Image (cartoon, rainbow, N blue to C red):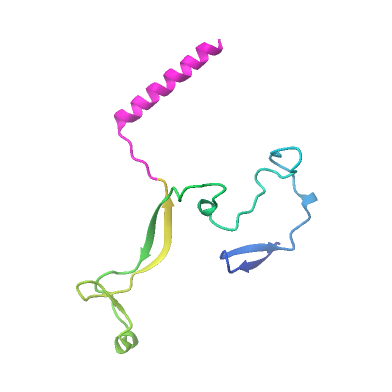
């Protein structure tokens, strides 16, 4: 059974007492003869969209906060009422809403006609390429 320790910086669990590398099957390939570094064995200490080596421009993802709670009319506990330690919305009603995560995605919307036209051009290019190879 593997043992883990918590990395507070990245908020992840890291395996300790890792077995020797001879126990693992070497998969992948080396980028060049000198490096002896398999293509998938790189570690990046941050989210990949923040690593300029991989994505030189700003993050391509749309980001949305995931919220939990009630935005209007939430019940306020006795202690919070006494200390006036609760959030309210614009109408003055109590709110217990909080951010619990973040959703990242690339969202693309296309019309049916645009999709048909794209595939029509794509298949025409593939047919032309196959004819050229023959």
The answer to whether residue 93 is above or below residue 79 is above
Residue drawn at (67%, 48%), measured in percent from left and top? 41
Q: Which residue is outermost to the top?
A: 134
Residue drawn at (62%, 68%), measured in percent from left and top? 6
Name which quarter of the figure residue 97 lies in.
bottom left
The answer to whether residue 69 is above or below residue 121 is below
Query: Would you say 107 lies left or right of 28 here?
Result: left
Question: Does residue 117 show up magenta in the picture?
Answer: yes
Count of numbered labels shown in the rendering: 0
The answer to whether residue 134 is above or below residue 1 is above
Image coordinates for residue 102, horizontal then vertical, percent? 42, 59
Q: Mostly what secondary structure, the magenta segment? A: helix
Image coordinates for residue 65, horizontal then vertical, percent? 38, 60
Query: Would you say 3 lies left or right of 76 here?
Result: right
The answer to whether residue 18 is above or below residue 133 is below
Image coordinates for residue 69, horizontal then vertical, percent? 34, 69
> For the N terminus, which image quadrant?
bottom right
Front-most of residues 94 and 56: 56
- The stretch in magenta equals 107-134
Residue drawn at (57%, 48%), measured in percent from left and top? 53
């Amino acid at each position: 059974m593997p043992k883990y320790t918590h990395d507070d910086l990245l908020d992840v669990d890291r395996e300790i007492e890792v077995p020797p590398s001879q126990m693992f099957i070497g998969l992948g390939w080396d980028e060049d003869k000198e490096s002896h570094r398999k293509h998938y064995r790189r570690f990046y200490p941050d989210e990949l969209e923040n690593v300029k080596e991989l994505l030189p421009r700003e993050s391509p993802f749309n980001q949305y906060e995931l919220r939990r709670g009630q935005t209007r009319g939430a019940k306020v506990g006795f202690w919070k009422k006494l200390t006036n330690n609760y959030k309210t919305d614009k109408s003055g009603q109590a709110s217990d809403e909080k951010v619990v995560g973040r959703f990242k995605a690339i969202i693309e919307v296309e019309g049916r006609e645009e999709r048909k036209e794209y595939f029509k051009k794509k298949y025409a290019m593939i047919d032309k390429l196959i004819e050229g190879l023959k």
